[in-house]
Amino acid sequence: MAIDPKYGRRDFLKDSVLSVAKAAREYSQHAEALPEKVAPAPRTDWLRPPGAVAEPLFLDRCTQCSDCAKACPHGAIVFHQGDGTPIIFPDQAPCMLCEDLPCVAACGTEALVSVPSRDYVRMGTAVVSHRLCTAGQGCHACASKCPTEALSMDFDEQRLLVSGERCVGCGVCEQVCKTVNDHIAIRVTPYRLLSPAC
């Protein structure tokens, strides 16, 4: 291919700029044609830390000071993206129900109040999806790790049972299930979402 002797550096730069501008215009048109990405819905399956008072009162008392999170030795307490209040995602880092509940002791506004023992904590209740649960195939990992012995196996029915009286909603079972199974078969329903009859 013969090179035009009149085609110089200035022509090359001009053509390069035009080429880049054309590519940018085509990209812009293509991007406008694509559907907008929808942000994922914010999670609602979070728990309040142990000792949390009823939700309306909690929101009134909590000052988002982060003292409870600083006191948590397991890093389970994080903050709600919307209002900055303390929450726990049990599948990521459950509440380990520390013997002395340092998060409660750190709260100076009584958004978290002391309880007689960890058996009186009420963060939620574990619910089993028997369709997904592999307890009938010999998996009892969640039951073996439950700190309040709220989970047991019904060997006649080959099903996992949850004692509503003993379950405090710490989420240890949910996190354990996530680590040993393909699908999480046990999830904690947060206390604030339970009906008053529960």
Image (cartoon, rainbow, N blue to C red):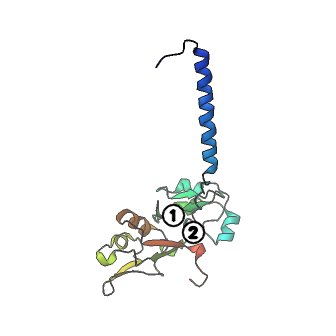
The furthest residue to the top: 5
For badge 1, the amino acid type reads Leu
Percent x, y of residue 198: 56, 82
Q: Secondary structure at mark 1?
A: loop
- Could you tell whether 20 is left or right of 117 in the image? right
Check residue 101 in the rendering and tell me which mark sits there, or answer none.
1
Image quadrant where residue 56 sits:
bottom right
The residue carrying pointer 2 sits among few (fewer than 14), some (14 to 19) or many (20 or more) residues within 10 Å by Cα, namely: many
Residue 154 in picture, x, y percent from top left: 34, 84
The answer to whether 181 appears left or right of 54 in the picture is left
Contact check, label 2 and label 1, Cβ < 8 Å = yes
Return the x and y of residue 16 as percentages of the image width and height: 58, 25
Question: Which residue appears farthest toward the right when viewing the image?
Answer: 60
Residue under pointer 2:
51
Judge left or right: residue 57 versus residue 69.
right
Quarter of the figure with residue 60:
bottom right
Report the front residue among 105 and 133: 133
CA gap, disc 2 and disc 1: 9 Å
Asked if 148 appears above or below 15 in the picture, the reply is: below
- Which type of secondary structure does the marked residue at label 2 adopt? loop
Q: Nearer the viewer, residue 18 or 97?
A: 18
